[in-house]
Amino acid sequence: MTDSTMNIALLQMDIAIGEPERNFAKLAELLEKAAAAERKPDLIVFPEMWNTGYALDRIRDIADRDGERTKAFVSGFCRKHGVNVVAGSVAELSGEAVRNTIFAFDREGNEIGDYSKIHLFRLMDEEKYLTAGERVGRLDIGGVPAGMMICYDIRFPELTRRLALGGAKLLIVPAEWPHPRLHHWRTLLTARAIENQMFVVACNRVGTSGTTSFFGHSMVIDPWGEIVAEGDESERILTATIDLAVVDKVRSTIPVFADRRPELYGSEERPL
Ligand SMILES: O=C(O)CCC(=O)C(=O)O
């Protein structure tokens, strides 16, 4: 990270359903590749539920107990390569509950935040197997205030607005978003960026699980709604460099936050 710029790498990977061993091995390979890039990443982001995929009928048996394996693995990588990581999300077993949880780490390998998906996606039966999180996902990445959300969460504009009002300049979104809703994915992510005048960094998986196929199209979108980078449908590492100073420029050009009328429709500004 130099001045206000940040190099980002998104691991747009395929996920072997119900096979954590294969997924950890795949991730290790992609991470080493991402770290070896000429333009060294400041931040790496993984997709949603990358350890297990949606093997929900046996999720309790294969979920990562308290995220211990994920934490040890990712934190060691961060320390070795001096990079921040938002470790997608994993199926996490915590007591009796299984949550869809993001763990985030700084360049020294310290855990700097976590977030469990608060809106469970009924179309994929998440609510039958998973327990929803109970708080919003706030993060500080080397001094940059950021928010974390997972997949379906982007359909709830109030959540992004809450994070933006709490100071977030960057929104990070791991996902497993399938066909045929590419139009929704691109439109919702772009809208979240434009209406909140923030960067959106979204990492989606590719590949097929049963009859569901995932289209990738991971995206980095700037606060003006311009697409800085977008993946295709193949497994790849998508990279982008963003300049966070653009957030303040856009916010002062069209002062949406100053022009709000929360007394008429709620969404008060308050610390997270
Ligand atoms: O909202 C959608 O269309 C997709 C959401 C989803 O697949 C998820 O949250 O896992």
Image (cartoon, rainbow, N blue to C red):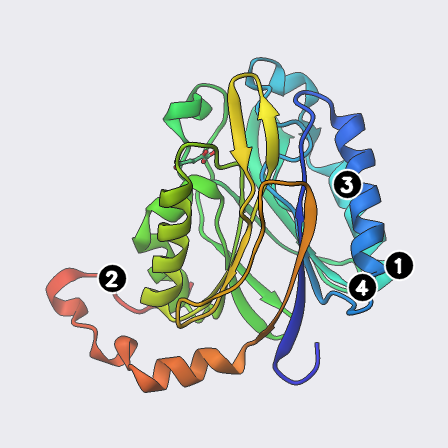
**Location of mark 1 (residue):** 80
| Residue hosting label 4 | 108
Q: Is mark 3 on a helix, strand or loop?
A: helix
Residue that protrudes farthest toward the top in the picture: 57
Instruction: Give the SS element for disc 1.
Output: helix
Mark carried by residue 110: none
Element type at mark 4: loop
Q: Tell me the distance, in whole angstroms, between the alpha carbons under discs 2 and 1.
A: 42 Å
Of tags 3 and 4, the one toward the viewer is: 3
Q: Mark 2 falls on what kind of element?
A: loop
Q: Which residue is drawn at 59% across and 25% down?
A: 208
Locate the N terminus by quadrant: bottom right
The residue that mark 3 highlights is 27
Quarter placement of the C terminus: bottom left
Separation of marks 1 and 4 at Cα, in angstroms: 8 Å
Residue 152 vs residue 162, the one in the foreground: 152
Which numbered mark, 3 or 1, is in the foreground of this view?
Answer: 3
| Mark 3 vs mark 2, CA separation in Å | 39 Å
Question: What distance separates the C-alpha of mark 3 from that of mark 4?
Answer: 20 Å
Please state the horizontal and vertical placement of residue 176, each as a whole percent of the image. 53, 36
Question: Counting residues from the N terminus, which is met first, the one under dot 1 or under dot 4?
Answer: 1
Q: Pointer 3 and pointer 2: residues touching (CB < 8 Å)? A: no
How many residues crowd mark 1 within 10 Å: few (<14), some (14–19), many (20+)?
Answer: few
Task: Tell me which label, 3 or 4, sits earlier in the chain.
Answer: 3
The local crowd at label 3, few if under 14, some if 14 to 19, many if 20 or more residues have their Cα within 10 Å, is many
Residue 267: mark in rendering: 2
Q: Nearer the viewer, mark 2 or mark 1?
A: 1
Between label 3 and label 2, give the one nearer the viewer. Answer: 3
The residue that appears at 34% across and 58% down in the rendered structure is: 191
